[in-house]
Amino acid sequence: MSFLPAVRWMFAGLAAALLLPTFALADDAEQDEVDAPAVAEIPVRRTAVKPATADEIPRLISDLDSTDSAVRERASTRLAASGKPAVDALSAAARSGSLESRVRAVQTLRRMFLEGNGELVDAADSALDKLADDGNASVASRAEATLNLNYDVRERRALETIRELGGIISYQENMFADATGAITPARTVSHIILGKDWKTGDAGLKQIKRLSRLPMVYYINESGVTEEGLRDLQASIPGLQIHRRARACLGVAGMSDINGRGCMVSNVIPNSAAERAGFEVRDVIQTFDGRPVTDFDKLIELIGSTKPGDKIKVEVLRDFQKVTLEPVMDEWKR
């Protein structure tokens, strides 16, 4: 054997000796990883923040304007943890003082709005809503941006409260195109009904005012809401349609017939008195309980003279034929 092949053989053997254990270790490591029990995540411990007392709140408000950023941050954190008692002080701070303290006050209210619950969320929401209408442009724009950017959160909370107060919420399915042109289905609120189960009269309308994209409200006569409350609600949501209704409900949408023959049915609500009685789209309602129907407004007026459970004779024109239907009036519930 020559010297050179021998050296090559020695190096090859040495490489094999070095590599083989490495592969074995790799295989063992993979096996250990498969067989090892899952390691539980260690929860992150958050230091509890002590709420400020009533005497401490003014000092903390003053600290929002400190030249020391650590002091400002500490004051913001403690005020946010102080709940509803700090909301009024923060609202006042947002209207006065330096730009730094005003911005900090709005940011702290935003934190309360997003992280709080119950009465605190309601108080922070109301404070931001008032600040959004404030004369100070920098404060108003920040408060309005907070509410607009978190509209989904605000809507969800308001709808939950509206249900608790006895309001009836109806939805519709819509299709929206995103920036890429892709079509996405979305469920939006079509209208809210304030009926006889509405518990708080005008006071509860503040929850509806938070739904700035709400298109329609139906107000049932026995809901306890006043005309003044409705005017205030209308002023709060530009474009909102408010329709007064009696307790009885037929379950159709309509329009004036172009030939002046009555009220043409444009939609029949599923599982309504109208659907159960056999109404169809394009039926022209000519009489209701023996009285002539000239348009949809007249139909609404005549429905208002009935009660849930009343059986009414209705004459419609269908494909040039007169048809008599007898719906049993329903109650507003959808």
Image (tube, rainbow, N blue to C red):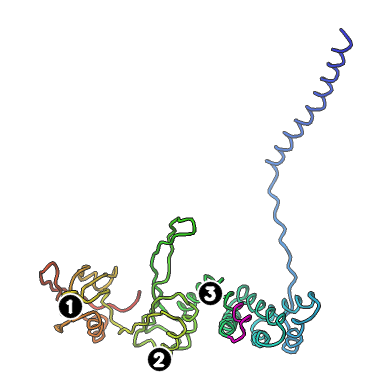
* Residue, far top: 1
Question: Farthest residue toward the left?
Answer: 321
Q: Residues within 10 Å of mark 1 (few under 14, many from 20)?
A: many
Q: Position of residue 89 (x, y in %)?
A: 67, 87
Please name the residue that numbered disc 2 is placed on.
226
Q: Main secondary structure of the magenta part?
A: helix
Q: Quadrant of the N terminus?
A: top right
Q: Which mark is residue 106?
A: none
* Residue at x-position 45% and y-position 77%: 163
* Residue to which mark 3 is pinned: 154
Left or right placement of residue 247 versus residue 102 in this view: left
Q: Residue furthest front?
A: 137
Mark 1, residue position: 262
Magenta highlight range: 134-142
Q: Residue at x 15, y 83 (%)?
A: 292
Which mark lies nearer to you, 2 or 1? Answer: 1
Q: Nearer the viewer, residue 250 or 294?
A: 294
Identify the element where label 1 is drawn: loop
Kindly state the secondary structure of the residue where label 3 is placed.
Answer: helix
Mark 2 packing: few (<14 Cα in 10 Å), some, or many (20+)? few
* Label located before the other in sequence (3 or 1): 3
Whole-Å distance between the Cαs marked 3 and 1? 43 Å
Proximity of marks 2 and 1: CB atoms separated by less than 8 Å: no
Task: Return the x and y of residue 261 as percentages of the image width and height.
Answer: 15, 77
Question: Front-most of 281 and 313?
Answer: 281
Amino acid found under the numbered disc labelled 2: Thr
